[in-house]
Amino acid sequence: MEVRQGCRERLGRKAAVGSQPQPGLMWEPVGTEACAAALGGALFLLLFALGVRQLLKQRRPTGFPPGPPGLPFIGNIYSLAASAELPHVYMRKQSKVYGEIFSLDLGGISTVVLNGYDVVKECLVHQSEIFADRPCLPLFMKMTKMGGLLNSRYGRGWVDHRRLAVNSFRYFGYGQKSFESKILEETNFFIDAIETYKGRPFDFKQLITNAVSNITNLIIFGQRFTYEDTDFQHMIELFSENVELAASASVFLYNAFPWIGILPFGKHQQLFKNAAVVYDFLSRLIEKASVNRKPQLPQHFVDAYLDEMDQGKNDPSSTFSKENLIFSVGELIIAGTETTTNVLRWAILFMALYPNIQGRRHCLGEQLARMEMFLFFTALLQRFHWHFPHELVPNLKPRLGMTLQPQPYLICAERR
């Protein structure tokens, strides 16, 4: 019993010693809390510094044009996005308050708006070299790395690419006497496709986009694409979608706060996905177009560009590259298709609204752009009488994109 009792006492003392808190374990929670507090404080100071920096960026510089006040951080982006009116109407109203030259704050990006023929002409014509540069916006950096043709910085790269594009459109396109006949040939394909509907309602947009883009395709690739080519149609649809996405509030916010690019959602992410698909498709088109290439004997823009790449192989300052070729081809397709397509869509819409002036093509034809729009439009008026199904008048409010395009509408084309 005594032995057992002694054992119990010794075990009791060991247990008592073992139950005492260890110094390291007692101080660990306190150290973790201090580290978390320090980290939180540093994060707060960082956010505070970034906030102050952003607010300082939003201050109008001395001598900067006046403009409407904006909200902290996002500036006038909210006013543009929340306005019941389209941005161009909103800005026209601001010009009546602040003058033809005023400014907007797009999330810390100071923007000058010109509203009026004279000031725009002074900027883009009389002082074109001064205003020829492009800002290094995150969207441009992500999409084309400030390369290509339309979004490149003003310098040798821009000058070289513009020179090549202008010469190519003149040499392979409008400068050729036979080019008018090529447009007329495309017009016949277009009219044949319209006649398949036999007066039934159809959406005019897809056919006119394909037809107009084929004129540009002849210059770029030396070939047209059939209206049944689903791959090319899909690319054109992605182009059209990106034109609208580029003018969305989400993209404006991305330009102001590029860190939101890490978020897996948003219209800017859809724009980037579309662009990746388009660039991959254009790369394959370029490879196909250059299969039968004969160096220094170009048949189209792609051939001419590859010749420039060959000549600049040993020039480290040359900006001609496979990547910039893809960017340039995409931009030329957009530039050669979007405006002409929307002009023709608006024109047919108004012809159906005011049928009493259809056929009077002389005056209307002269007011349209040369050759392409004139030949397409006059052929459409000569061959068809246009009207809406069941007298259903479409919404005339424009749809915002890089250009103002009409809302989707159905149209009937009756053979004259």
Image (cartoon, helix red, strand yellow):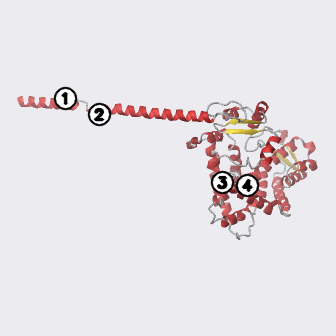
Closer to the camera in the image, 239 or 177: 177
Q: Is residue 184 above or below residue 360?
A: below
Q: Quadrant of residue 244?
A: top right
Q: Label 2, label 4: how many angstroms apart (C-alpha)?
A: 69 Å
Depicted 39 relative to depicted 333: above or below: above
Q: Position of residue 188 (x, y in %)?
A: 84, 58
Q: Are marks 3 and 4 in contact (CB under 8 Å)?
A: no
Q: Are marks 3 and 1 in contact (CB under 8 Å)?
A: no
**Residue identified by numbered label 1:** 16
Q: Which of the marked residues, 2 or 1, is nearer the chain's N terminus? A: 1
Give the structural element (helix, strand or loop) at label 4.
helix
> Along the polypeptide, which appears first: circle 2 or circle 4?
2
Q: Earlier in the sequence, mark 3 or mark 4?
A: 3
Closer to the camera, 18 or 166? 166
- Badge number at residue 25: 2
Question: Which residue sits at x=55%, y=36%?
Answer: 50
> Which residue shows up at 71% across the image and 46% down it?
243
The furthest residue to the front: 62
Residue type, mark 4 in image: Leu
Are circles 2 and 4 on residues that touch, CB within 8 Å? no
| Between discs 3 and 1, the one toward the N terminus | 1
For the question of whether residue 93 can be seen, the reply is: yes
Tell me which corner region of the image, top left, top right, bottom left or bottom right, holds residue 75: top right
- Give the position of the N terminus as an image quadrant: top left
The mark lying in front, picked from 3 and 2, is 3
Measure the alpha-carbon separation of dots 3 and 2.
59 Å
